[in-house]
Image (cartoon, grey):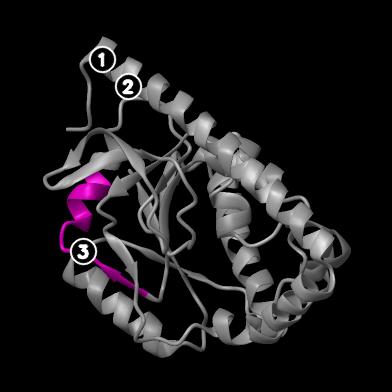
Amino acid sequence: MNRVFVISLDHRHDRRNALTARMRELAIPFEIFSAIDGKLLTKADLDAYDDFLMKRKILRSLSPSEIGCYLSHLAIWQHIVENNIDSATILEDDITISDDFPTILDGIVHIPFKWDLIRLSGLDPTPSLKLCQISPGYTLAVPLGKANGAQGYSISRHGAIKLIQYSQPIPGTVDTSTLDCYFEVGLLAMDVRPYPIHENRFFASSIAEDRRPIVDAYRSVKKKSRLRFAIYRFKRSMSNRINFIYQLLNFIRFKTYLSRNSAAPK
């Protein structure tokens, strides 16, 4: 059984109520997982974050909301491992959901080979290679680029273990610095196309508002230290190329399994 967890800030009743109504409409059982509020971070929360490392890695600090977001996802990964949950689907509360989502969840349960991560959403278009149909009108594919966003994804228990190990300390944002780092984390990653989960732009992003002054400072670094930024761009470009090759190899691995076993989600 693929359990569904919804990350939701306790005070955002508008988001929680809207998503609760939608999940009930689709008859999808789910559990609310209270998000960690970036405005209420404890010393223990901040101990998981190294600002010096962050500025060296991505040239800026994380905002309190970004730290809270990362820790919320990390807490669910730990919950999955500690409770021996085979796989789970993690959703944020600022999303819209396709009517076909229940059949997609059923298809994920019946994937015949080992996997770690299946993206159900993405903010940026990225090329992918089709593997097989997972539900009428939807295909299971291998993404070749970084999709950005963490609005919805499925994770296996062994995938959660890999993400937890990679998160000591927090390496950056939960999407571009972790979920999209297939090679660095060692993830067997796929996605569902078209995405059944999308960001609900009706709800203002607390992370975007909180991050604005930090991003402004990052832009200042770009202007003042062109060498640092050039090195950062080079490292990011190399990471993207390595991940592209890594995903091509994973596609061959998955495709070979399907060809030999004539198996696909049913």
Classify mark 2: helix, strand or loop.
helix
- Pointer 1 residue: 259
Classify mark 3: helix, strand or loop.
loop
| Residue 248 occupies quadrant | top left
- Pointer 2 residue: 255
- Percent across and percent down for residue 210 are 63, 85
Residue depicted at 33% across the width and 67% down the height: 198
Above or below: residue 86 compared with residue 64: above
- Percent across and percent down for residue 51 are 84, 67
Residue ranking furthest to the top: 260
232 inside magenta stretch: no
Q: CA distance from mark 2 to mark 3?
A: 27 Å
Residue depicted at 53% across the width and 30% down the height: 246
Q: Do the numbered discs 2 and 3 sit on residues whose CB atoms are within 8 Å? A: no
**Total marks drawn?**
3
Give the quarter of the figure containing the N terminus: top left
| Residue 190 occupies quadrant | top left
Q: Is residue 233 left or right of residue 80?
A: right
Q: Which mark is residue 98?
A: 3
Q: CA distance from mark 1 to mark 2?
A: 6 Å
Label whose residue precedes the other's in the sequence (2 or 3): 3
- Percent across and percent down for residue 119 are 40, 50
Residue depicted at 37% across the width and 58% down the height: 121
- Percent across and percent down for residue 93 are 41, 74
Q: Which residues are magenta?
A: 95-106
Residue depicted at 52% across the width and 30% down the height: 245
Q: Do the numbered discs 1 and 2 sit on residues whose CB atoms are within 8 Å? A: yes
| Residue 141 occupies quadrant | top left
Res. 219 in view: yes
Label whose residue precedes the other's in the sequence (1 or 3): 3
Give the quarter of the figure containing the C terminus: top left
